[in-house]
Amino acid sequence: MLLDLASSHKVLFFGGKGGVGKTTVSAATALATANAGGKVLLVSTDPAHNLGHLFARPVGPSPVRITAGLEAIELDPNESVETHIKEVSQALHQLMPVTQHGEIDKHMALSRDAPGMHEAALLERIADIVQDGIGSYDLIVFDTAPSGHTARLMVLPEMMSAWTEGLIKRREKADRFAEVVRDLGRDSSMQDKTVGGANLAEQEKESRIRQILLRRRHKFGHLRDTLSDKDLTSFVIVLAAERLPVLETIELHQQLCRIGVTVGGLVVNKRSPEQQGEFLAARRAQENKHLKTLDESLGVVPRQELALAGQDVVGLPALEVFSAALAKA
């Protein structure tokens, strides 16, 4: 199932409750796709990054080559915020009088730790990666943060698109009003002297504002359309066969469906093996009860089960073995 999703889509998101193995499963899917000849970008959006630990090598905010065909990035929320603030500050400095620059800088400094700032900055980076990378890579794989954070992040493109659209409409109304004023001014030679040359700079400023808003509308609109296109994007929920992960999976599935994101599959990770003694038999029987609850709610969603590994999956050789097992599961 996983490899079928990877071969038929351009973007895969992996999410689920913390500690269920999202990073391992997403990285193994990316590696298997690269080994099959694809060019893949693996992106971690989780502030508690694990790609570097998994591959046993440094991974940062710029693409790092892991193997032939596979590159990886760990998005740094703090760096994303700093970049976001810098870009917004530069735009405001261009649009506002020099006398207001100090107030702009003070406001942006206070905004650094404002609620939602990290999510907005992270969304900007995700939008850029999707927009720039969808034509450069055969597959982009996102390893996301635990369910609650991911659900909020996935709804942001629609919210940001609507917010930007509202700003553009207000800007257009203001432009139309300004045009009426200019037309009235042309009826008076005294007003014409005031309006004609003096408003050239104002018109240029309004043009820059429109350009900024239109670029943001295009960026967030492209991400929103990509997320909602079931032929381009699919979401995979990773879980353990335990009560809380099962219930959280059902809730996450409902949230994603409400915002138009297609859940292409479920991965039940760390499944207890069969016929391995009394303890594991009892454990597997307990898991089956929880999976019955999953079947009752999400029985129509394709599902793949991965066995509990005897050792930690750390380093490229171990991940190669794990990724090879995906085709057999």
Image (cartoon, helix red, strand yellow):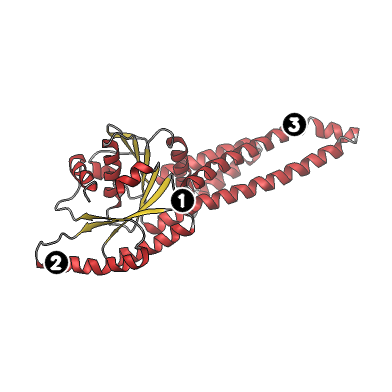
> As displayed, is residue 188 above or below residue 301?
above
Furthest residue toward front = 300
Mark 1 nearby-residue class (10 Å; few <14, some 14–19, many ≥20): some
Residue 242 position within the rendered picture, expressed as x and y whole percent measured from the top left: 26, 65
Q: Return the residue at label 1.
A: 119
Residue 281: give its label: 2
Which image quadrant for residue 138? Answer: top left
Near-viewer residue (222 or 120) = 222
* Mark 3 and mark 1: Cα distance apart in space: 37 Å
* Most foreground residue, 242 or 225: 225
Residue named by callout 3: 200
Counting residues from the start of the chain, the first of labels 2 and 1 encountered is 1
Q: Say which label, 3 or 1, has the lower sequence index.
A: 1
**Left or right: where 50 falls relative to 107:** left
Going by the numbered disc 2, the residue's amino acid type is Ala
Tell me the distance, in whole angstroms, between the alpha carbons under discs 3 and 2. Answer: 79 Å
Of labels 3 and 2, earlier in sequence is 3
Q: Where in the figure is residue 329, as x and y percent of width and height?
A: 22, 51
**Considering only vertical position in the picture, is 308 above or below 31?**
below
